[in-house]
Image: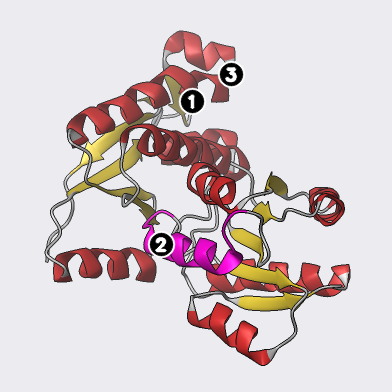
Amino acid sequence: MADKRLLVIEDHADVAELLVTYFQALDFDVSHADTGETGIELARLKFPQLILLDVGLPDIDGYEVCARLRQAALTRYVPIIFLTQRDERANKVKGLELGADDYVTKPFDLDELRLRVQTAVRRASADNLHEARTGLPTATLVEEELLRREGEHQSFADLRLILSGYNAYKDVYGFLAANDVFGFAARIIQDVITARGTPDDFIGVLGDEFVVFTTAADPQAVSSQIIERFSAGITTFYHFHDVERGGVLINPGTATERFVPIMALVQVAAETE
């Protein structure tokens, strides 16, 4: 999963092309939507770390898009920066009241916009709101989401998944490769939840544990599909000789040599107070 994922919801082709090209050059993984409805769907599919949202869209305005993104669990905590040609205070206040994180008036300075985007992403990580490897909600936001659901007496399944063998893999292949694996797992979880879950499902990270709150009809089938898809793809992250022997050797040739099987996603019980 890319370190920096940006969604641009902008219907003016020239502005959209400028933003996509500019942020791609800064190593962002950029998705683009030219309507509000498409933007809402892409936000659910791509799980961006930040959304640049034009107010004046051809189908529904940016305010409605923002409100709907804030209502859905998967996108509730994604930072949003409004883009608009309007400069009236009332419009800015309306956007911020709906949950936007910032407001930039067109025509904007690209360097200033870059700083605002980077600051918003960095602040979310620094405040322990988004997990650095994936951009998924973590710690405070996971707890907030859990308390919200319990407070509203919602019925949902609480699925917890960990990567068995992750630390051994990191010892052998390094933390950058391990981060790629963690991102791969997050992407699979997101894809399965998008396909088989509901619009109110939630994905977060606590330490090295994935947290999924789902109201799917068969949550264990969802969990099983996540585990199976991870198992089918994880070998691409190993050297062929490790794949052939089914795992990695830790401290080879020493008294503490041990064999750790290829990583697997494993469902574990949620901790209770």
Q: Disc 2 or disc 3, which is closer to the eye?
A: 2
Q: Image quarter for residue 50?
A: bottom right
- Quickly name the residue at label 1: 252
Give the residues in magenta.
59-74
Q: Among all residues in the image, which is located at the extreme top?
A: 244
Nearer to me, 82 or 160: 82
Instruction: Identify whether 125 is placed above or below 91.
Output: above
Q: CA distance from mark 2 to mark 3?
A: 31 Å
Q: Are marks 3 and 1 in contact (CB under 8 Å)?
A: no
Which residue, given by chain and number where applicable, does mark 3 sit on? 239
* Circle 2/circle 3 CB separation < 8 Å: no
Instruction: List x then y, in percent, for residue 245.
Output: 44, 11
Dot 1 surroundings within 10 Å: few (below 14), some, or many (20 or more)? few
Q: What residue lies at 58% left-to-right and 50% top-to-bottom? A: 39
Residue 69 in the image, given as x and y percentages of width and height: 47, 60
Of the image marks 2 and 3, the number of the one nearer the N terminus: 2
Disc 3, SS: loop
Q: What's the residue at 34%, 22% (across, down)? A: 228
In-image side of 220 versus 56 (left or right): left
Q: How is the image coloured?
A: secondary structure
Relative vertical location of residue 269 with respect to residue 169 in this rendering, above or below: below
Q: Amino acid at mark 2?
A: Thr
Can you say which quadrant of the picture contains the N terminus? top right
Residue beneath the point at 49% across and 82% down: 97
- The image position of residue 194, as x and y in percent, is 40, 38
Quarter of the image holding residue 70? bottom left
- Camera-near label (3 vs 1) is 3
Image quadrant holding the C terminus, namely bottom left
Q: Circle 2 is placed at which residue position?
A: 138
